[in-house]
Image: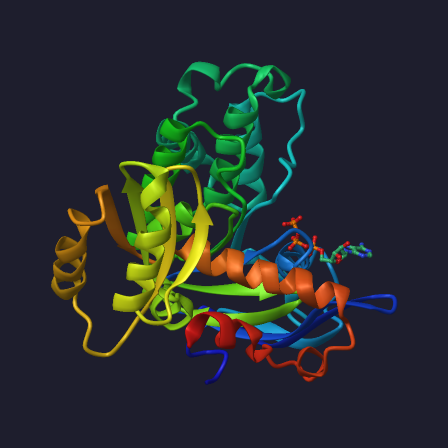
């Protein structure tokens, strides 16, 4: 793929801080109107990746191209295509929200005559109308976050980089931000976001990668990742009395071979069911219906493994690896098969 083919192309991008390799050669691309999610535990290398894309941090090796411009050799041109909402609100607290947007509109080179309309449209869309003329130091954390997003939107850039755009934002405002981002995508902008909310990633991302210790461990659509790395299905069974637990466990393991009891509370059992080729939702429910009454299961639910469960599994594995850095498969840059053995059968 050539850098001119897509708005964002990242090729073998690496970041070293002294002897420490924070980003270990990642590759991805983002198409027009797509949203790419970068997920990872704290310290995985997401912000370092963003900072290399925005030119805030030098690239150690590899390269990234924004609308064909290299962030190493044409960083000014590449940067002009990017709107960036950083993780920590980079705003001058003595200015008002409106003044801030005017300032960024001028920096972006929007003609003076168009600025009032552009700024008003952004203020309306991010919903800070009431506070627009107040100093930012009086804003709540959520409103500062909305303003940071507004700044990134000035000039409707081709590529939007959003580092945890909804952290600290209340659920209603979060939906507003999701709506704005969906509209921005409809206009053709490409989005890259980091988030610790799996719900957010499922709502917004067309593709995502889970990053662990500076490397991508999986990449694909949320559905693809769930199907490939999810163990299958989650069964929650609530019992009439704890005395039935032993028998329920035995029976579940018998009718769903390979299933694993993940959690056990007084009256609730949580199983991960192994997925098989010929299984359908109706067959799963039919099997449960056959045993539910006899085993005094008061109610139960069956659901597909969530993205959060997949993420937690990778994170758990990351914890194991950090304690065992001599693990050869990790050093070779391949995801150890431990996850596969335990969860992908
Ligand atoms: N300037 C720096 N000098 C040395 N090490 C750094 C520097 N910046 C980041 N690191 C280290 O690089 C690794 C990746 O950090 P980074 O901030 O990119 O992770 P992250 O995935 O964005 O984490 P978070 O979710 O907490 O924001 C961490 O181990 C961090 O301590």
Q: Say which residue appears at 51% left-offset and 16% top-offset.
A: 133
Percent across and percent down for residue 47 are: 65, 54
Q: Say which residue appears at 42% left-offset and 57% top-offset.
A: 261
Seen in the picture, residue 151 relative to 291 is either above or below; the reply is above
For the residue pair 11 and 273, the one nearer the viewer reads as 273
Percent across and percent down for residue 344 are: 43, 74
Q: Say which residue appears at 18% left-offset and 55% top-offset.
A: 291
Task: Count all numbered tags in the image, as a single digit.
Answer: 0
Q: Say which residue appears at 31% left-offset and 53% top-offset.
A: 248
User: Which quadrant would residue 172 be assigned to in this image?
Assistant: top left
Seen in the picture, residue 192 relative to 237 is either above or below; the reply is below
For the residue pair 23 and 40, the one nearer the viewer reads as 40
Report if residue 37 is visible in the image: no
**Viewed as shown, does residue 282 lie left or right of 187?**
left
User: Which quadrant would residue 58 be assigned to in this image?
Assistant: bottom right
Seen in the picture, residue 128 relative to 254 is either above or below; the reply is above
């Amino acid at each position: 793929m050539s850098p001119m083919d897509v708005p964002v192309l990242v090729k073998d991008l690496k970041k070293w801080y002294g002897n420490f390799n924070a980003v270990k050669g990642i590759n991805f691309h983002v198409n027009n109107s797509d949203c790419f999610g970068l997920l990872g535990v704290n310290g995985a290398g997401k912000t370092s990746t963003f900072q290399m894309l925005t030119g805030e941090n030098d690239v150690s090796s590899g390269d990234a191209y924004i609308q064909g411009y290299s962030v190493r050799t044409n960083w000014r041109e590449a940067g002009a295509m990017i709107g960036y909402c950083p993780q920590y609100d980079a705003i001058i607290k003595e200015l008002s929200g409106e003044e801030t947007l005017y300032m960024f509109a001028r920096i972006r080179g929007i003609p003076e005559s168009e600025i009032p309309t552009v700024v008003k449209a952004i203020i309306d869309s991010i919903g800070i109308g009431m506070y627009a003329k107040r100093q930012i130091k009086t804003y709540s954390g959520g409103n500062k976050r909305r303003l940071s997003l507004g700044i990134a939107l000035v000039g409707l850039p081709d590529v939007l980089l959003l580092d945890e755009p909804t952290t600290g934002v209340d659920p209603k405002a979060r939906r507003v931000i999701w709506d704005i981002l969906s509209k921005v995508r409809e206009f053709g902008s490409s989005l890259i976001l980091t988030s610790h909310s799996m719900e957010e990633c499922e709502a917004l991302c067309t593709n995502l990668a889970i990053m662990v210790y500076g490397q991508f461990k999986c990449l694909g659509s949320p559905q693809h990742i769930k199907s490939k790395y999810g163990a299958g299905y989650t069964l929650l069974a609530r019992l009439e009395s704890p005395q039935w637990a032993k028998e329920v466990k035995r029976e579940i393991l018998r009718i769903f071979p390979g299933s694993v009891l993940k959690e056990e509370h007084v009256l609730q059992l949580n199983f991960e069911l192994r997925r098989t080729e010929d299984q359908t939702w109706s067959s799963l429910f039919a099997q449960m219906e056959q045993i539910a009454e006899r085993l005094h299961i008061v109610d139960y639910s069956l659901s597909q493994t969530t993205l959060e469960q997949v993420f937690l599994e990778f994170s758990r594995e990351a914890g194991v690896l950090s304690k065992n850095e001599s693990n050869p498969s990790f050093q070779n840059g391949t995801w150890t098969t431990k996850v596969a053995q335990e969860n992908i059968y």
